[in-house]
Image (cartoon, helix red, strand yellow):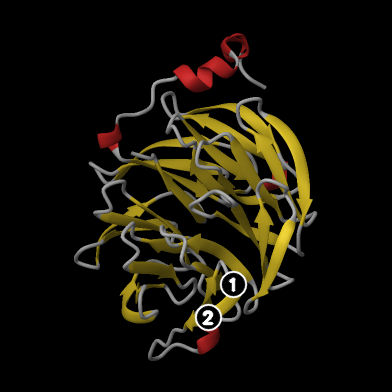
Amino acid sequence: MWRRCYLLAGTALWLAAAAPPASAFIAYVSNEKGNTVSVIDTDKWAVTNTIKVGQRPRGIEFTRDGKFVMVAVGDDDTIQVIDAKTQAVVDTLPSGPDPELFTQDAQGKVLYVANENDNTVTIIDLEKRARLGDIQVGVEPEGMAISPDGKILINTSETTNMAHFIDTATHQIVANVLVDARPRFAEFKRDGSELWVSSEIGGTVSIIDPAKHAVTGKVTFEIPGLRREAIQPVGIGMTKDGKTAFIALGPANRIAVVDAASHKVTKYLLVGQRVWHMAFTPDEKYLLVTNGVSNDVSVIDVTAQKVIKTIQVGELPWGITMAPQ
């Protein structure tokens, strides 16, 4: 529930609250086991606040206007909303059971939430803070992405091993694309030409032609001294120019640097233990990645492709988000 002042302000608060300065570069990290969100100041490269949230926070993302941070608290079956100015939880949004990842439309008016326990994607009106309905998808939905033109929503289902293409106008599935085992994350190139889907158990990233609904290639990984089953791709981050992708390889404790044109790995960066998700600073100078087992965040210099800093956060860091610029 909103506090009394927020109840009086209603939706206007969402529009009027002051966003943090664009130059501040503040990151929010969800700590899955600690039931907290760590706030990182990227000028100081230090945690400046720890926010207590609900049970098992995972997916985390700023609203499009940068005024609020939304975090999926899976064991509480809801999305909590943090005011980025006060860094306090001020609201909850309705979801299905065990929400994990979510994405927004370009205007920040509609939120789409993957609910792992009931095989649905919940549609939420962010202005009214109301649940509009659900879309039935595959078993254990997780990955969420929206096409650059806003017309197609992607959901990946871990057990069905598919990427579901959903028409955002009709909310109907228009295509299902089979990928390798346990797809966890989906990311479009900025020009909409490719969709990348990571498969944790399959150990690959599938490259999908969004127009043809077909897998056209795969990114594969090989690290000397590591068994293939230890290389488990999860999070994906792609530069705005579409030239370089960074892929988190889970218990391999590496970030793979990939040439996005050739789909070939050019470098592996050693980070913390069980690397999971990532976020660029708005200027794309740095990439921050969460390391679940070592309870820290690695900072990568994007141009140098080098790890320059480690920041201790809460217990089992999972997701990370940066304010839009």
Q: Which mark is residue 189?
A: none
Number of numbered discs overlaid on the protein picture: 2
Callout 2: few (<14), some (14-19), or many (20+) C-alpha neighbours within 10 Å?
Answer: few
CA gap, disc 2 and disc 1: 9 Å
Q: Secondary structure at mark 1?
A: loop
Q: Position of residue 74 (x, y in %)?
A: 67, 48
Above or below: residue 216 compared with residue 9: below
Query: Which residue is pictured at 71% across the width and 61% down the height?
Result: 174
Disc 2 vs disc 1: Cβ atoms closer than 8 Å? yes
Query: Which residue is pictured at 62% across the width and 10% down the height?
Result: 4
Q: Which residue is mark 2?
A: 216
Q: Position of residue 104 (x, y in %)?
A: 56, 43
Query: Which residue is pictured at 28% across the width and 53% down the height?
Result: 284
Q: 128 or 171: nearer the eye?
A: 171
Please give left or right for residue 76 compared with residue 17 in the image. Answer: right
Q: Quadrant of the N terminus?
A: top right
Q: Position of residue 138 (x, y in %)?
A: 76, 64
Most extreme residue toward the left is 304
Q: Which residue is mark 1?
A: 212
Most extreme residue toward the front is 211
Please give left or right for residue 295 compared with residue 117 in the image. Answer: left
Above or below: residue 68 compared with residue 196: above
Looking at the rendered structure, the kind of residue marked 2 is Thr
Above or below: residue 59 compared with residue 220: above
